[in-house]
Structures are given as C-alpha cells and as structure tokens.
Image: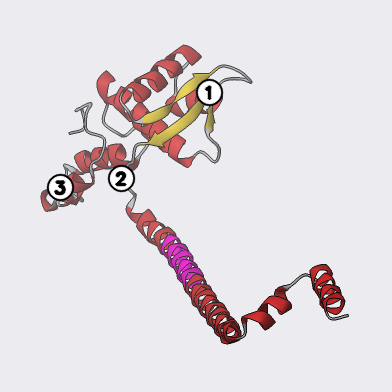
Amino acid sequence: AVPDPAVHVFGELLAAPPIQSLAGTPEAAALELLQLFAYGTYREYAADPSRPPLSAAEIAKLRRLSLVSMAAAAPAPTVPFADIVAEMGVATVREMEDIVIDAVNRGLVQGRLCHSAGGCLLLTGRVAARDVRPQEVAELGAVLARWRGEVEGAMAECRREVERLAAAEETEVARRAAVEEEVARVKAELGKDSAAPDMQMRFLEPPVQREKRRKGTRTLFT
C-alpha cells in the first residue's frame, strides 16, 4: 500500500489487528513507516535518520501527502513557495513546482501556481483527506460537536421563524375573514334599503343634481 501511487489513505490498514500487533516487535519499523504515510510528513521523515530508506517513488508520494497536509492547514487560500520548498526539502523552486503539479494532476489538491508576490500555491477548491493522528481524534470530536451545536442552533432558529410565519399567516387569515364578514354585513344593510329605491337614489344623488331636482319641483308646483 505504501508504494502504490493510487493509495493515500491508510486508516483501515492501520486498524487491522495484524498490523497493530507489530508494535514492540522487531517489525515495528514497518508499522511506523505506515503511520508516517498515514498522517506524517516528509519533514518528519528527514528529521529522523533512524528511519528506513525510501525509494524515489515513496519519497515523491510522501512529499505529495505532505503538501496535502500543508494545504489543509493553511490559514489562507495560499501556500507560499518558500514554505513548500522548506517542507519538501528540495533545493529549487522548479523541484517544488513539479511536486505541486503532480499533486494537482492526481486530484489531491485543487489549485494553481501563482508567481506574483514571491510565488505561492493558490488553492481554488478541495483538498484530499488524510488519516487523523490518534491524539487528534478528541480534538476532531470537539470540532464536530461544536459544528453539531451550530447546526442545531440554526435549525432551531429556522423552526422559530417557521412558527412566526405560521402565526402571522393565521393572523392574516383571521383579518381577511373579519373584513369579508364586515363587507357582507354592509352589503346586507344596503340590501335593506333596496325596498325604498327613491330614498336610495336620493342618498346616492350628487348634491348639484339634488338641488336642481328640488328647484324643478318648486317650479312645477308654483
């Protein structure tokens, strides 16, 4: 699994009892090597001369995984070239660029090289996941617990908003019903006046016409 260029996650293999049983045995170096590729970095490997030597392909793979860790931990969507060069233990920017291009082409990091302002890897999308160190599991659990609390809080706020809108809708329905009831009452009252159409017409008659009608009535009876 370690030399396989397509395998970048080793958690299931590490959890296997036969692998765990290597701890404390003469074969413990194999377990430590697997742990290095699971969540370690090239800098950790280079800092420990007691580790077994790696092939060129294995070193290239460890450097790609180290870049994944750097990108995932970056506080901003950029990783300076200088930091990558130092982490990878390479001598030139060109070697560093080859590592970055290889990681991008393999889908481990989504980004592009940016040569302005000293140069950096500009992250534009997802970063592949790596295994979690055993001592980081509790911290990861705390992060997930906080995230769950935030999600539950947002859901509770959504429920309150839904309830508020439902109450407002009920109020509006009641208001419309009251208006319709009042309109029906007024229509009923106006309907009673239909028995006296002359009075209704006089009530609706404009003042000017009403005055002309009164004058005409006086002239007729003079």
The residue at the point 39 percent across, 20 percent down is 99
Q: Amino acid at mark 1?
A: Phe
- Residue 56 visible? The answer is yes
User: What is the x, y in percent for residue 97?
Assistant: 44, 17
On screen, residue 152 versus residue 8, left or right, reads right
Residue 3: name its quadrant.
Answer: top left
Above or below, comparing residue 156 to residue 30 in the picture: below
Above or below, comparing residue 22 to residue 81 in the picture: below
Task: Check residue 81 in the rendering and tell me which mark sits there, or answer none.
Answer: 1
Instruction: Determine whether label 3 and label 1 are within 8 Å by CB.
Output: no
The residue at the point 49 percent across, 20 percent down is 113
Q: CA distance from mark 2 to mark 1?
A: 25 Å
Which range of residues does the magenta coloring cover? 146-162
- The answer to whether residue 150 is magenta is yes
Task: Check residue 131 in the rendering and tell me which mark sits there, or answer none.
Answer: 2
Closer to viewer: mark 3 or mark 2: 2
Instruction: Determine whether label 2 and label 1 are within 8 Å by CB.
Output: no
Task: Check residue 19 in the rendering and tell me which mark sits there, or answer none.
Answer: 3
The residue at the point 50 percent across, 72 percent down is 169
Considering only order in the chain, which callout, 1 or 3, is on the residue closer to the N terminus? 3
Q: Quadrant of the C terminus?
A: bottom right
Above or below, comparing residue 106 to residue 168 in the picture: above
Q: Secondary structure at mark 3?
A: helix
Q: How is the image coloured?
A: secondary structure
Q: Secondary structure at mark 1?
A: helix
Q: Residues within 10 Å of mark 3 (few under 14, many from 20)?
A: some
